[in-house]
Image (cartoon, rainbow, N blue to C red):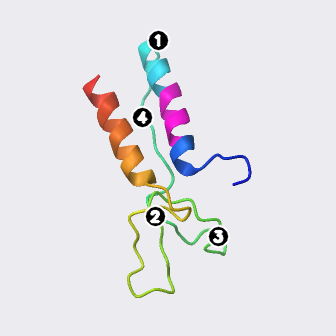
Amino acid sequence: RADGWDRVRYLEAHLAVVADMLDAGVDIGGYYHWTLADNYEWGSYEPRFGLYGVDRAAAECWHDVDSMGGDAAGTYRRLITHMRES
């Protein structure tokens, strides 16, 4: 993206706000990130916003990185683990 906001930066920013709210005593019922993998939505496979990228043209279609090349799933896992431990 031209503004520099990749999925990793987005997750870090959003989960930091959730952590701040929890620290302030706000009762957060949960956090749900949409979506685990790139999917078919609104008649198209675009936009691609899954934590894992899916390349439907390749024999091995699941990728350990998102469609932008970032480790979004790893970042999500790391941030959630840190929040649970603190």
Q: Residue at x 44, y 24 (%)?
A: 19
Q: Nearer the viewer, residue 79 or 32?
A: 79
Of badges 3 and 4, the one in the foreground is 3
Earlier residue among tags 2 and 4: 4
Q: Is residue 38 above or below residue 7?
A: below
Dot label at residue 6: none
Look at the numbered disc 2 and give the secondary structure of its residue.
loop
Look at the numbered disc 1 and give the secondary structure of its residue.
loop
> Neighbour class for label 2 at 10 Å: few (<14), some, many (≥20)?
some
Q: Is residue 60 above or below residue 53?
A: below
**Segment tinted magenta in the rendering:** 11-17
Dot label at residue 24: 1
Residue pointed to by mark 4: 30
- Looking at the image, do the residues carrying marks 2 and 3 touch, with CB atoms under 8 Å apart? no
CA distance for labels 2 and 4: 20 Å
CA distance for labels 2 and 3: 12 Å
Q: Amino acid at mark 1?
A: Ala
Q: Residue at x 65, y 75 (%)?
A: 44
Residue pointed to by mark 2: 37
Q: Amino acid at mark 2?
A: Ala
CA distance for labels 1 and 4: 16 Å
Earlier residue among tags 2 and 1: 1
Q: Within the magenta stretch, is there residue 61? A: no
Q: Is residue 32 left or right of residue 84?
A: right
CA distance for labels 3 and 4: 27 Å
Which quadrant of the figure contains the N terminus?
bottom right
Earlier residue among tags 3 and 1: 1
Earlier residue among tags 1 and 4: 1
Earlier residue among tags 3 and 4: 4
Q: Amino acid at mark 3?
A: Glu
